[in-house]
Amino acid sequence: MARRAHRKSRNGCLECKRRHVKCDERQPVCSNCTTSQRVCEYGSRFLSAYPRSPLPGRVGQSASPAPASGGASPESQGPSSAPVPDQPVNMLHVDLFHNLYTEVHLTFDPTRSFPWLADLVGESITTPYLVNELLAFSALHLSTTRPSRREFYRYHAAHLQTHALSIFKESNPQVTQETCVPLFLFATVLGIHMLCDTLIYREETSLPAFLPRFVHFFRLYYGVRAVISEAWSIIQDTVLAPTFNYGRDVYAFDGHFGPGCSKLLSLITNANLGKDLTDTYRQAIESLQSCLNVTEGSHEPHASINGVTTWPILVQIEFGDLLEQERPEALVILAHYALLLHRFRHSWLFGDSGQFIIVEVTRHLGDEWKEWLEWPNDVVNRSEE
């Protein structure tokens, strides 16, 4: 008997893909995730939301805001907690905004990161897609600080983010003097949101299972660079100009490697991998050294965290392909990046993800790569003493 052809969904949610079940692509929460009370996320959101950017992959379908009855929250905790997407604002949104203003901004130093208070709030009030993403990011934060209601806030983080992207695509904002600041802030917050969600909410227990999701994030995060590139000249005449100029200077590689990155580059060079591959790895290591300089050189922990979130933007997109292929050298560089994550393991953004990556890369590659991974493992082992 001939085998029936299977039509694979390319636009299904990440949870259905992980479980290898067919997704009906209902948004913001598909039927499978509604039934099983799982957090439903659509990984193609940023690609579909910003089609003008030179991003790899297939452009997904647009996400449409669901009616209030479209998907039940994982837990019902009174009328003030229930999702009410048709209303302009509800008590949950007030709670999220208050948390954003009083708590979330403390994660980053407002004087050396992108502006989190007056400038950010001023831009977001008149930009619906940005304010929805800011509330989504606040909900993600509360999912880590209020563990008893973790799934409730995770649900709303995904729901608000999907709504933000739906508004973004529908409005299709062009890069102008008026839109460049909210566009940049939206791309930045969205990228950090995806990084955080990928790292702290990993159900995967092994590197081969975790890696595809990280690669997926890496490619989507590359869209932040596309937005920055398109808006660069215009942003120089906005309130973000000092932030951009500071970032341009502080993340420029100064030509000097520390002992760890110097050894890593030497091992890469001596492996005779060919010019193209070696150049890609060199650029990733140079970018890592620049981020290490930021985290090590600043005495302000909130500012230092920016070095962790910046590395995935600086690295060439080809590096993601090498991670997807599970190239050993690329995995070693990822383990060295995990040192930055491990340094800020007490931050809600990263948790124990740094140690997880280092341990799993070491286990995956085996004793043959012990010398290559000596520095990351030494740091993890010392922190456990």
Image (spheres, helix red, strand yellow):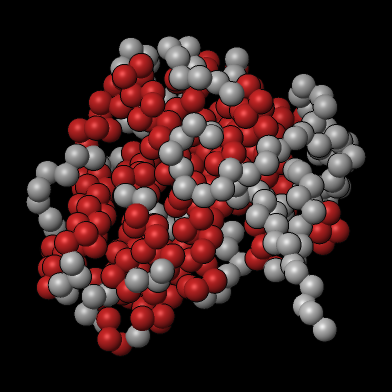
Nearer-the-camera pick, 267 or 271: 271
Q: Residue at x 59, y 39 (%)?
A: 48
Residue 126 locus on image (x, y percent): 60, 15
Q: Residue at x 18, y 67 (%)?
A: 274
Q: Residue at x 13, y 68 (%)?
A: 269
Nearer-the-camera pick, 145 or 136: 136
Instruction: State whether residue 348 is above or below residue 139.
Output: below
Is 63 left or right of 102, judged from the image as shown? Answer: right
Tell which residue pokes out farthest to the bottom in this image.
367
In this figure, what is the number of numbered marks? Answer: 0
Instruction: State whether residue 120 is above or below residue 279.
Output: above
Is 320 left or right of 44, judged from the image as shown? Answer: left
Q: Residue at x 38, y 26 (%)?
A: 230
Quarter of image, res 98: top right
Instruction: Say if residue 218 shows up in the picture.
Output: yes
Instruction: Say if residue 119 shows up in the picture.
Output: no
Residue 298 locus on image (x, y percent): 25, 42
Placement of the C terminus among the 4 image quadrants: bottom left
Tell which residue pokes out farthest to the front in this image.
2
Placement of the N terminus among the 4 image quadrants: bottom right
Residue 211 locus on image (x, y percent): 48, 66
Is 154 left or right of 190, judged from the image as shown? Answer: right
Quarter of image, res 276: bottom left
Nearer-the-camera pick, 384 or 329: 329
